Image (cartoon, helix red, strand yellow):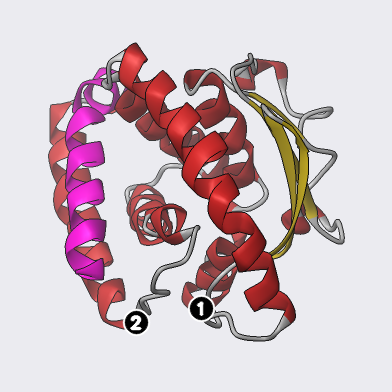
Amino acid sequence: MLIRKIRFIFNAMTRTAKSGIQTIYGADFYRRFAVLSRQHLESMLPRVQDIGDSIFAFNYLYGPCYFAWYQTLRDLGVEKSSALNLIWQINEDFVKSIPTPLLRWFGKQMYLGTFRKRAVRAEQLGKAGQLHPFDWRIEYTDIDRNTFRIDIFECGMLKLADLFGYRELFPQVCRMDYLFSHYFHQSFRRSGTLADGNLCCDCWYQAPGACEWAPEKGFEYRK
């Protein structure tokens, strides 16, 4: 089941990225990108462990996709910063392909509904040492009806990156939390991440809300 889910996300996002990649690099580049990235993904899948019924199980699925795309872009001669920017674009192209009402519903249901209801239990499992080794360890703070905070002390995505040797994608990949929050119509902020060298990722969410997504402005104050 885990492998099927990863493949589904990978295939869907690779397809929605086609036009954007062809515009920048051409049709032949995209064809090579699609084939080679699939090969890289398949080589990783046997080593990706299933973290079970984690509240971060959906986030976890993206890791192998990011690594496969990044390795392929580097293999095809794309320098690091451009490769990371293209992974941002792949995510944005995919999110923009989803109708806005559905994105708003998902943001509300996922973060203010399912996630909040299960976050306390996730915190308890972490403190009891009962999490899967590749799961996230968090502390949860309920602020008000529309607002909550999670402090992340262990990140499953970073653990995957270390397993496959892709820590160099971080902390840039972490900034995509602003992208998703922008399109989910949420407010989001934090002072930094584990990948920035902080003791935790101090994430603050509010929905409904607004979050600017402007990579061209840099991330000096948005980490």
Which residue shows up at 49% across the image and 58% down it?
A: 56
Which residue shows up at 21% across the image and 25% down it?
A: 26
Q: Which residues are magenta?
A: 1-24
Which residue shows up at 72% across the image and 24% down it?
A: 218
Residue 137 visible to the viewer = no
Would residue 22 be counted in the magenta stretch? Answer: yes
Residue 195 sits in which quadrant?
bottom right
For residue 218, above or below residue 124: above
In the rendered image, residue 203, in percent from the top left (x then y), is placed at: 74, 42
Would residue 111 be counted in the magenta stretch? Answer: no
In the rendered image, residue 90, in percent from the top left (x then y), is placed at: 36, 33
In the rendered image, residue 118, in percent from the top left (x then y), is placed at: 55, 57
Q: Amino acid at mark 1?
A: Leu
Frontmost residue, 111 versus 83: 111
Which residue shows up at 61% across the image and 29% down it?
A: 178
Q: Secondary structure at mark 2?
A: helix
Q: Does the CB distance between marks 2 and 1 fall below 8 Å?
A: yes
Horizontal side of 216 relative to 58 (left or right) equals right
Frontmost residue, 72 versus 59: 59
Q: Amino acid at mark 2?
A: Arg
Q: Which residue is mark 1?
A: 163
Query: Which quarter of the figure is the C terminus placed in?
Result: top right
Residue 41 visible to the viewer = yes
Q: Which residue is mark 2?
A: 47
Q: Residues within 10 Å of mark 2 (few under 14, many from 20)?
A: few
Q: Secondary structure at mark 1?
A: helix
